Amino acid sequence: MLCAPIPANEHTRLETLRGLNVLDTVAEERFDRITRLAKRLFGVSICLVSLVDEDRQWFKSVQGIEAEQTGRDISFCGHAIMHHDVFVVEDTFKDERFVDNPLVTESPHIRFYAGYPLTMPNKVCIGTLCLIDDKPREFSQDDCHALEDLGHLVEDEIVAIQQMTLDALTAISNRRGFEMLASQVLANGDRQGINTSLLFFDLDHFKQINDEFGHAEGDKALQQFAGLLLDGFRESDVIARFAGDEFIVLLSYDAELNLDAVLKRFDALVNSHNQQSDSPYNLVYSTGVAHRAYNSSVSLNEYLAQADKAMFAIKALHHK
């Protein structure tokens, strides 16, 4: 068996994939209708929208099997993303790359595979729309074009999700994107015994920046603060612009977290920015903190309300 290779642009590819905020999200009709159509159109037993993560392929849409993911090393889609055209294996028994692959020798007993590499606007391939059958078959050029057409629909839907869940000004998650990701983080934490903390940031004197220096400068302040949040917290933390001049960060941890040290590091980062900046104002903020233990009955909306209340209490002290 030939293990799935790693593309030269793997770092960018993974950043692009994870930036879509779609991994480990619930099934959606927008994708399921395409995989149902493809399964019926091509007469295959399985059709997937498969996203190739660092060490797994995860299925955003599944028709024909119960699995949610498989290992990347044995995946056919890991091979398909190395190409920009449809990747076809008409008979795995006649292909030395796959003849002894566990997905061939064991369930689902793949004999035929065709995968269209899903390509994002920055030209990286994040996964496939793929067809699988337990019988060998021929796949014509017309078949390839038909699969490409359906693949373009999947790409359009993925880009649409990104546009709906990203804040256009700062390029971090917006409120909708945060709620999608945070729901997954909390559900996963409840399953795996992981606690979380929610930080609610509000830029102080933001109206004054707009009034004195103009809205372009206000936009710049928001972009700079978003950049500092990205620099100051982990890639695994959920960072979002919640509304206006409000930002939120959701941290998860399975061991004791020294939150004071985390906040002090971020404060030092902002202070360093202010000292080096040529802006006629400093970035000043108030922070509210809320905590949620795993398996807590506190909903996401209640959690946000707690952090928001804590932030306003801190903000009131700043204005005394």
Image (cartoon, rainbow, N blue to C red):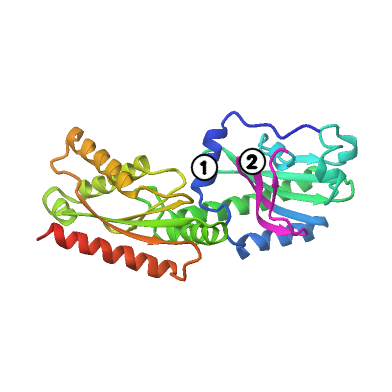
At x 15%, y 60%, the residue is 317
Place of residue 147 in the rendered image (x, y in percent of width and height, measured from the top left): 72, 49
| Cβ atoms at labels 1 and 2 below 8 Å apart | no
- Main secondary-structure element of the magenta-colored stretch: strand
Element type at mark 2 = loop
Q: Determine whether 98 is above or below 107 in the image.
A: above
Place of residue 242 in the rendered image (x, y in percent of width and height, measured from the top left): 34, 59
Left or right: residue 235 versus residue 101 is left
Place of residue 134 in the rendered image (x, y in percent of width and height, measured from the top left): 87, 51
Is 290 in front, or is 269?
A: 290
**Amino acid found under the numbered disc labelled 2:** Asp
Q: Which residue was labeled with disc 1?
A: 16
Q: Which residue was labeled with disc 2?
A: 55
**Amino acid found under the numbered disc labelled 1:** Thr
Read off the magenta span. 49-73
Place of residue 118 in the rendered image (x, y in percent of width and height, measured from the top left): 63, 45
Count of labels in the image: 2
Q: Earlier in the sequence, mark 1 or mark 2?
A: 1
